[in-house]
Image (spheres, grey):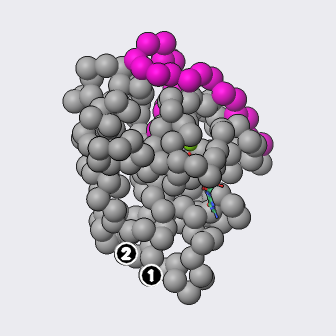
Amino acid sequence: MKIDASFVKSAAGARDLPRDALARIALVGRSNVGKSSLINALVRRRLARTSAAPGLTRLANWYRVSREREKPFYLVDLPGYGYAKGGPSSSREFEKLTASVFGEGQHRQTHRALSALLIVDARHPGLESDRAAWEWMQETVAASGIVATKIDKLARGRRIRAIEEIESVFRHPVAAVSAATGEGLNELWKLIARLTKHE
Ligand code: GTP
Ligand code: MG
């Protein structure tokens, strides 16, 4: 299957975000959870920079992605939360993120063309900061999904239990993936297709 992906821009704030009407999917998650790696795994190229040290992605990085003959959309790689000292998941951190994706002063509105994927670590169900991020997403975006990544780090026998636990915390289905092995990426593409069609 053919996938086209290109870097569009880095945005520190509200100015010069793409103005077209293409769907946008923001990746939301703790620093170091594997958001940038997941983008690379999805598009099968090293587009986004990744690092073993948390806090690498500091701006909202916009990528334009299209798959076969489907309509293109934007994947937005966001800086992770929970890295800055002074408390993970403070609403200030989320508001800063919101501003970098939608523009300042609009964070109370729901953004119809925008959906978000919450990326959590399959090994750490129900972290406080992830739950706060999920709540923020419910108030902010039109459609959302949950992805549990680094599933390769769990022994096979523990995976189903781990996913069930995450699903019960968020009361929402979870797609289990690994950017390292590529497991679950087909399911994730299906989820992405559903999110981009939600208009
Ligand atoms: P920030 O930009 O700091 O918010 O981090 P991020 O969420 O973009 O994480 P990043 O993709 O940079 O990955 C962090 C570390 O986790 C890197 O060392 C990756 O190689 C590793 N990693 C990411 N995804 C996986 C995975 O699915 N499996 C394994 N084993 N390691 C992974
Ligand atoms: Mg990153």
Q: Residue furthest left?
A: 108
Q: Position of residue 67 (x, y in %)?
A: 68, 40
Identify the residue at horizontal 66%, vertical 27% (top origin). Answer: 7
Residue 64 vertical placement versus 182 (above, below): above
Residue 3 inside the magenta-drawn segment: yes
User: What secondary structure is found at the residue carrying circle 2?
Assistant: helix
Q: Position of residue 178 (x, y in %)?
A: 62, 62
Tell me which corner region of the image, top left, top right, bottom left or bottom right, holds residue 68.
top right
**Residue 69 visible in image:** no
User: What secondary structure is found at the residue carrying circle 1?
Assistant: helix
Residue 77 vertical placement versus 135 (above, below): above
Residue 188 inside the magenta-drawn segment: no
Instruction: Please say if the residues under marks 2 and 1 sit with CB atoms less than 8 Å apart.
Output: yes
Identify the residue at horizontal 47%, vertical 54% (top origin). Answer: 119
Callout 2 crowding tier (Cα within 10 Å): few <14, some 14–19, many ≥20? some
Residue identifier under label 1? 161
The front one of 149 and 73 is: 149
Callout 1 crowding tier (Cα within 10 Å): few <14, some 14–19, many ≥20? few
Which amino acid type is shown beneath numbered disc 2?
Glu
- Magenta residues span 2-26
Q: Residue furthest top?
A: 16
Q: CA distance from mark 2 to mark 1?
A: 6 Å
Q: Position of residue 102 (x, y in %)?
A: 38, 24
Q: Residue furthest bottom?
A: 157
Ligand 2's image quarter is top right
Residue identifier under label 2? 165
Identify the residue at horizontal 56%, vertical 40% (top origin). Answer: 56
